[in-house]
Amino acid sequence: MSTITFRRNLDSETLHVPELRSMVGHSVEIIVRDSQPVPGFDSDRSALLQKVDELYQQCSQPGWDNEDAEPIGMQTHAIARRLLELLPNDTPLPVISPEPDGQINFEWYRASRRLLTTSISGTGTLYWAALIDSEDPRGSCQLADQFPPTLLYWIGMVCG
């Protein structure tokens, strides 16, 4: 996935998107993404969906880590599956792992100082943190009916 980000003032001579007309005269950040599907995306996503199912089976009891880990709940499992299903096919797939607090972690990693980690809770809240060189932005967002734009932005910053 290639991503280009730039800032500019919108003026009526360069604006060809009707939805942005209200922003003429404003300084905006424009993000352009290459939308070519990642080769093998569908089969790789199917394998990750299966891995989410396996994690749920293996980690659905208290102490699944032979210590004090919280179980992964049915809602967390369902939300993790939904997030993967909504992931656009031009986006790199994450590495998935269980967390001892009962959440499921999705991580996009490019290098030691370029990564994004997202913890999926059973409430639908996605807690994310990125490390991009010396920056360490973090936040949260809710999963709705599309893959969260905030996460797409940070995946692009990490992997683009």
Image: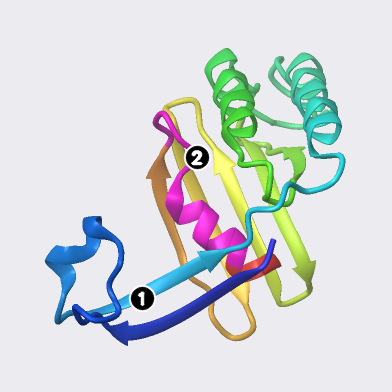
Percent position (x, y) of residue 6? 44, 82
Image position of 19 with respect to 88: above or below: below
Residue at image location 48% in from the left, 48% down from the top: 127
Image position of 62 with respect to 143: above or below: above
Q: Secondary structure at mark 1?
A: strand
Residue at image location 57% in from the left, 25% down from the top: 82
Percent position (x, y) of residue 8? 32, 86
Whether residues under marks 1 and 2 lie with C-beta atoms below 8 angstroms apart, the answer is: no
Tell me the magenta residue range: 143-156
Viewer-closest of 154 and 58: 154
Label 1 to label 2: alpha-carbon separation = 20 Å
Left or right, 29 with reference to 160: left
Percent position (x, y) of residue 92? 73, 51
User: Looking at the rendering, in which quadrant would you find the N terminus?
Assistant: bottom right
Residue at image location 66% in from the left, 42% down from the top: 105
The amino acid pointed to by label 1 is Glu
Percent position (x, y) of residue 60? 70, 16
- Judging by the rendered image, the residue that carries numbered circle 1 is 29
Image position of 62 with respect to 84: above or below: above
Residue 147 is covered by the magenta coloring: yes
Disc count in the image?
2
The circle drawn on residue 137 is none
The image quadrant of residue 46 is top right
User: Looking at the rendering, in which quadrant would you find the C terminus?
Assistant: bottom right
Residue 66 is covered by the magenta coloring: no
- Judging by the rendered image, the residue that carries numbered circle 2 is 147
- Here the colouring is rainbow
The amino acid pointed to by label 2 is Phe
Viewer-closest of 121 and 86: 86
